[in-house]
Image (spheres, rainbow, N blue to C red):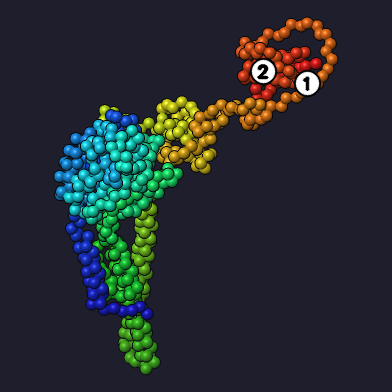
Amino acid sequence: MPTILSHGDIRAVISFRSFVLAAAILATTGVSAFADKRVALVIGNSAYKNVARLQNPANDAAAVAGMFKSAGFDTVESRLNVTVSELRKTLREFGNKSRDADVAVVYYAGHGIELDGNNYLIPTDATLETDADVLDETLPLDRVLFAVEPARQLRLVILDACRDNPFAKTMKRTIASRAVGRGLAKVEPSSPNTMIAFAAKAGSTASDGDSKNSPFATALIDHLAKPGLDLRKAFGFVRDDVLKATNNAQEPFIYGSLGGNDVSLVPAPAVVAAPVDQDASMRRDYEFADRVGTKPVWDAFIERYPSGFYTALAKAQRDKLMAELARLEATMRAKAALEEQSRLAIEGAKADEQTRAAEQAKAAERARIAAELAKKAEEAKVAEAERVKAAAMAKATEQQAERAKAAEEAKAAAEKKAREERLAALTPPADKSDQPTAVDLPRSLQAELRRVGCNTGAIDANWSAAAQKALDLFNKHTGMKLDVKTASIDALDAVKGKAARVCPLICEYGFKADGDRCSKITCRAGYEVGHDNTCEKIEVRKPTARREEPQPKREQPARSNAAPEVSRPQASESGQIICRNGGCRPVGKGCRIGSVKQYNGQNAQVEVCN
C-alpha cells in the first residue's frame, strides 16, 4: 500500500525545498570578485644600426602585444626599435604605471649580452666597440626588474634576447680576463613573486626562427594567456613546444619563485551557480507526490505550484483519485441496499418496506454506475495528460539535442575564429611604416610548402593544380589527410608545425642533394659517375696487338660544335664512349663513329674499331 503522509508533512517537505531554492538564489546574487589591474610593456628591437638586422623581434613584439590586449590587460605599451635614451624613458614611465598595478609584465625581444655575470639589454643605437661601452650604451636587466617591482601580486619579465650576439665577436676587451658570455647569465631575483623567463637557458643561444616569429614567441602566444592556467605550467608547455620545434636544440628556462597558489596571467572564468530550473523542480515534486498518491499530497502540490503543465496533471491525478473513492463508496452503498432488500424479503416485512428497500437498492446501483463512469472519465483525462506529458518530454529532449548541436557549432566557429586571429597576430608588419594586410592563405600556404621542400613551383595568390600537388606530397610524407582542394587555416597550421624539411630533394643525374640544393658530383681521377649516381672506377681494356693493313683513306666525320679540342687521340677499343655531357674526344686510330646509344638515361656516341 502507498505511504500516507499528512497534509502537514507535505507542507514541511515543500517548505524545506523552498528554503533550498531560496538559498541557491541568494548564492547566485553574490558580489563578483575584484578584478586585478594588469599592465604590460612590450619591446622589440630589430633594426640595429651597427650590426645586421634581426628579422623577427619586431614581429614577435607585435604578436605578443596583441596577445596581452586580447587577454584583457588594462594597459599594453608597445615600443619598437628603441635607442638607449628611449629605453630608459620607457622603463621609467612603465615603472610609474606599475605602482598601482597588481600584475606587471615586461617582454623584450632583441639582442642581449652578459658581462661579468650581469645581463644587459642592447638598444638599436649601441656600438659596443669595447667591453667598457656595455656600461654606457646598454641597460642592465636590474633596471627592468626595478620597473616591475612596485606591482603588488606578480612581477614577470620575459627575455627573448638569447640570440647569437654579433657585438661579442668584434668587441675589444680592455681586460683580457673579462668574461663575455654566450647567451645570458643565470639570474636569481631578490623580490618575492618575481619570475624571469629566458628563451634559452643560461649560457645558450635562442633561434630567431625561419618563419615570421621565433619558436619561443609562437609558444608564448599559444599558452601564456590561457584563462586560469598556472604560469609554471604554461612555461612548461612553452618549453615542450620550443624543444620540439628546434629538435631539442633550444630549451627555455625560468628563474625565480612563486607561492603555493596557482598564478595565472588571465583569471579563470568565474563559476556561476546554474539557475534553478523551475520545470525540473516541479517535475521532481510531482514524481514525489505521485509515489505517495494521496489527496492531501496532491492538494499540497497544487498549492505550491498553482499553474503549469505538471499542475494540470496533478489535478487530473487528484480528480481520478476522488472518482475512485466515490466509486468505492457507491459500490458499498449499492451492496448494502441489496442486502437490506434481501433481509426484508426473508423476514416477511411489510410490502411497503420491501418496496422502499427495492427503490433504494436501484438508486444505489445507479449511483454506483455513475461513479464507475466518472472514474473511467477521469482515467481517460489522466491518460491524455500522460500522453501530452510524454510528447512534451520528447520535444524537450529534441530541443535539448538541437541546443547541444548549436553549442558545438558555435564552439567550432569560435575555435576557428581564434585560429584565424592567432594567425593574423603571427603575421604583423615588420616595421612601423608597413601597412597591415589581410592574410593571403594560398600564397602563405605555398610559401610554407616550399620551405618544407614540397613546392617547387611559383608562389601566387591562386590555389592551382601545382599547389594542390604540393600539398598532396606533404600529406604522403607526413601521413596527414588535409584537403588539397582548398587552402585552409588547418593546412597552414599543419605545415607551419614542421620545422625541418618534409619532402625529399630530388636531383638530376650527375647531381646530389646538398642541404636544400643540388650540387654536381665530382669524382677523383680514374673514376666517373655511374648509373646509380655514385663514383665508379673507369675500366680501360688493353688493346690487343694486330697486324695493321693498309686502309683506304676516308674522310673523318665532322666533330660536334660543342666538343672541346683534344691534341692527341687516345688509344681506343670498340664500344668505348667518345661523346657525353662533357663533350667529345677524337676518334681513335683505325676506328669510326658508331651508333648513338643510351647511357645513364642520355644519348651517347660510341666508336667502332676493327
Which residue occupies the foreground of this view, 419 or 231? 231
| Mark 2 neighbour density, 10 Å: few (under 14) some (14–19) many (20 or more) | some
Percent x, y of residue 228: 29, 53
Mark toward the viewer: 2 or 1: 1
Label disc, if present, on residue 603 of the rendered structure: none
Residue 368, placed above or below residue 518: below
Q: Quadrant of the N terminus?
A: bottom left
Q: Which residue is mark 2?
A: 579
Q: Amino acid at mark 1?
A: Pro
Residue found 63% across the figure and 12% down from its top: 565
Q: Quadrant of residue 283?
A: bottom left
Q: Quadrant of the C terminus?
A: top right
On the question of residue 382 being in view, the answer is yes
Residue 123, placed above or below residue 564: below
Q: Amino acid at mark 2?
A: Cys
Left or right: 209 with respect to 155?
right
Residue found 23% across the figure and 55% down from its top: 192
Which residue occupies the foreground of this view, 543 or 11? 543
Which residue occupies the foreground of this view, 315 or 116? 116
Percent x, y of residue 555: 74, 6
